[in-house]
Image: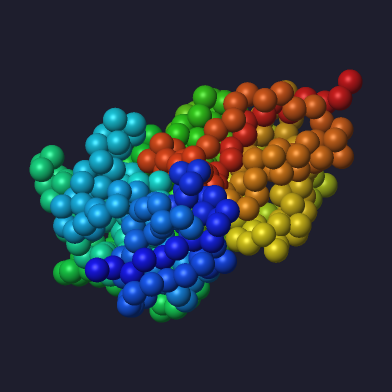
Amino acid sequence: MSAVVTLKKGEGRTIKAGGMWVYDNEIASIAGAFENGDIVDVHDFDGFAMGRGFINMASKIRIRLMTRKAGQEIDADFIRMRVQNAWDYRKQTVETDCCRLIFGEADFLPGIVIDKFSDVLVVESLALGIDRMKDKIVDAVKEVLASDGISIRGVYERSDAKVREQEGMHRQKGFLGEAFDTNVRIEENGVKYDVDIQNGQKTGFFLDQKYNRKAVRKLCKDAQVLDCFTHTGSFALNAAQAGASGVLAVDASESGIAQARLNAQLNGLEERVEFVCRDVFELLPELERQGRQFDVVILDPPAFTKSRSSVKNAVKGYREINLRGMKLVRDGGFLATCSCSHFMSYELFTKTIQQAARSVHKRLRQVEFRTQAPDHPILWAASESYYLKFYIFQVCEER
């Protein structure tokens, strides 16, 4: 028999609305023996069964639900069903050569991310309970893909995020199974990349911007483009391949710029893109003083905030780069700007852009608003699954 967790009266609002988490301050009592990472039953204050999930007393997120069905066995068949559903969804919604195959809570496998780069999987495990199921989940992914004729040649773990420490876990990375070459060649939107899954940021490549990069391409023919925070060159290379007359791509990471240059050579675009290793906040004012103007400016910064406590400083950062970016857009040109921080809400990000536009006397005409690619599904009531906000604006002078 599993332990039974009973919620306080009036608590459990998140899971009652469709979410997956129970916080430490929502629990009235726990009856029965358990170890951290075990599956427990969750009951409302009146005994109503609300589902089953794994518990971790070391985490403020005390329970992450695996199922809403009372008595559901969390076994190999259950895991395969979850994985099969996730893969079927990807086949219907995205190009699957490279995609996020498992997206944690949004695929009802809380705390684990699995990215597919061609014939390689990269796993990020962030919660204790799911970490104990990690090998079974990876095996299920291999089986499900094999049933569609897809063979996986290697699996690499990138569970080296600091958030693991909040679960009482150590950070770790390495091969799950036999070693293989961790430089993986992929193709997205017709652009080739060499991805370093061992040492690159997160799992090695940001798949969530796949269709946002594609959306920017139509603006770039014969354009002068500025790509800020280029990382390994993805927006810049999409712009160049779409026919930009010139692209200036900037990032503060020397290793990122080195990889971006190699990716440009891989696509025969090295003559069309100039890569510069600089701090964007320092470079943009310099470009303004030089009188530089661009037809398209792209702002794809890292998350300026990873907690509610630092949102105020993050707003300052987003306002600064957006007003600087707007000043560098030629009248009638375009600004693509985004935030990948969950804590920078849609409303706050929108307000910050409005403030930036007013302060530099620019008028914005919204071309479109986008979010993350469909392989990063947004589960309503699980707000943590919605993080990427992406705008494209035409920037006009006030007259």
Question: Where does the image place residue 75, in percent across and percent down from the top left?
Answer: 19, 59
At a point 50% along the width and 35% down the height, the residue shown is 212
Determine which quarter of the picture holds residue 282. bottom right
Residue 152 seen in this snapshot: no
Determine which quarter of the picture holds residue 196. bottom left
Question: Where does the image place residue 144, in percent across and percent down from the top left?
Answer: 16, 46
Question: Where does the image place residue 381, in percent across and percent down from the top left?
Answer: 51, 43
Instruction: Check the image and name the residue furthest to the top.
Output: 399
At a point 41% along the width and 56% down the height, the residue shown is 47
> In which quadrant is the N terminus drawn?
bottom left
Residue 182 in the image: above or below residue 374: below
At a point 38% along the width and 72% down the height, the residue shown is 31
Instruction: Check the image and name the residue furthest to the right.
Output: 399
Q: Nearer the viewer, residue 246 or 165?
A: 165
Question: Where does the image place residue 118, in percent across and percent down from the top left?
Answer: 25, 47
* Residue 190 left/right relative to 151: right
Q: How many marks?
A: 0
